[in-house]
Amino acid sequence: MSEQKSVALDLEGIELHYGYVKALDGINFKVNQGEAVALLGDNGAGKSTLLKLMSGVHKQTRGTIRVHGEEVHFHAPKDSANAGIEMVYQDLALVDALDSATNLLLGREILRKGPLGWLGFVDRKKMIAEANAETELLGVKIANLTRPVEMLSGGQRQGVALARAAVRVNGKPNGILLLDEPTAALGYEQKVMVEGLIKRLAAAGIAVVVVTHDLPLAFNATSRMVVLNRGRKVCDVQTTETTYEKIVGYITGALPAQEGI
Ligand SMILES: Nc1ncnc2c1ncn2[C@@H]1O[C@H](COP(=O)(O)OP(=O)(O)OP(=O)(O)O)[C@@H](O)[C@H]1O
Ligand SMILES: [Mg+2]
């Protein structure tokens, strides 16, 4: 729909081997700014592996990755973060002993004024207010911002991890957000919230890639769908131009790979 398509991520001819296992084989994958793409496929299809290439956790055996048109060679997640890429991992990385507000603002702590601030003392009140304001803006509810994350439920932790990535990427002109099964632990209401969040971020110009087993979420929140099957791309379609049944067919392998993708 958007007239001006600026390519955020462009992966070409990607191959990745884990020892003898060929996890990705000849993958071409593009995402535009302002586009939300669902990355689908059965367990072990290669979805997380593909996201981890884009976020600098793994390095491809073959192929090229371009971010905003420039070829990149990420060696660590901080390299992708510097390029404007935020990722929420399937196995979430939060600091257990800290509360949600601190996790949300990790790396952006608000220090107290004066000598206490110079010594690194944080302004808790301000941080909680800031975390509240940011999550409210994004429409993500977090139960209790002042509880240590280790005391939260799986779903609540997922909410915090997602909100943190959304807060970090929100407002970046060329922001890219990678989500690996962000709703796996969430209840119905929270899922609907995440759908809204993905749509809002895409509408604001962020490029979003969401790995999910939740097809209703993929149909509701994304405008394009890419299916992997045992390391190969078998489908790449506009969401409005496919059906639930077809996507299931590509996921299970009942349908042969599309031609020319
Ligand atoms: N660190 C690793 N070392 C060796 N093999 C791996 C590693 N990570 C993944 N694999 C293998 O690579 C293949 C793709 O795995 P990947 O985690 O990308 O799948 P996935 O599509 O994310 O699956 P799921 O839906 O279960 O999360 C699988 O065969 C898996 O066993
Ligand atoms: Mg995975």
Image (cartoon, rainbow, N blue to C red):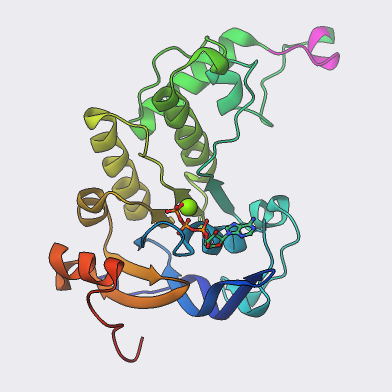
Q: How many marks do you count on the picture?
A: 0
Tell me: 109 left or right of 133: right
Task: Work out which quarter of the rendered image holds the N terminus and state it.
Answer: bottom left
Of 100 and 252, nearer the camera is: 252
Seen as rendered, the residue at the extreme front is 20
**Image height of 139 relative to 253, above or below:** above
Q: Nearer the viewer, residue 169 or 158?
A: 158
Check residue 238 for magenta coloring. no
Q: Nearer the viewer, residue 62 or 100?
A: 62
Q: Is residue 2 above or below residue 161?
A: below
Can I make out residue 186 in this image? yes
Ligand 1 is in which quadrant of the figure? bottom right
Q: Residue at x 35, y 51 (%)?
A: 212
Q: Is residue 209 above or below residue 186?
A: below
Question: Which residue is drawn at the image coordinates 41% and 42% (left, top)?
Answer: 182
Res 243 visible: no
Place of residue 133 in the rendered image (x, y in percent of width and height, measured from the top left): 43, 23
Magenta range is: 116-122
Q: Give the quadrant of the C terminus.
A: bottom left
Q: Quadrant of residue 138?
A: top left
Check the image and report above or below for 164 versus 27: above
Residue 38: give x, y in percent of width and height: 34, 60
Say whether residue 118 is magenta: yes
Q: Residue at x 53, y 79 (%)?
A: 25
Q: Quadrant of residue 68?
A: bottom right
Camera-nearest residue between 117 and 49: 49
Q: Quadrant of residue 187?
A: top left
Q: In the orientation shown, which residue stands out farthest toward the bottom?
A: 260
Seen in the image, is 123 located left or right of residue 159?
A: right
The image shows residue 166 at horizontal and vertical percentages of 46, 40
107 relative position to 252: left or right: right
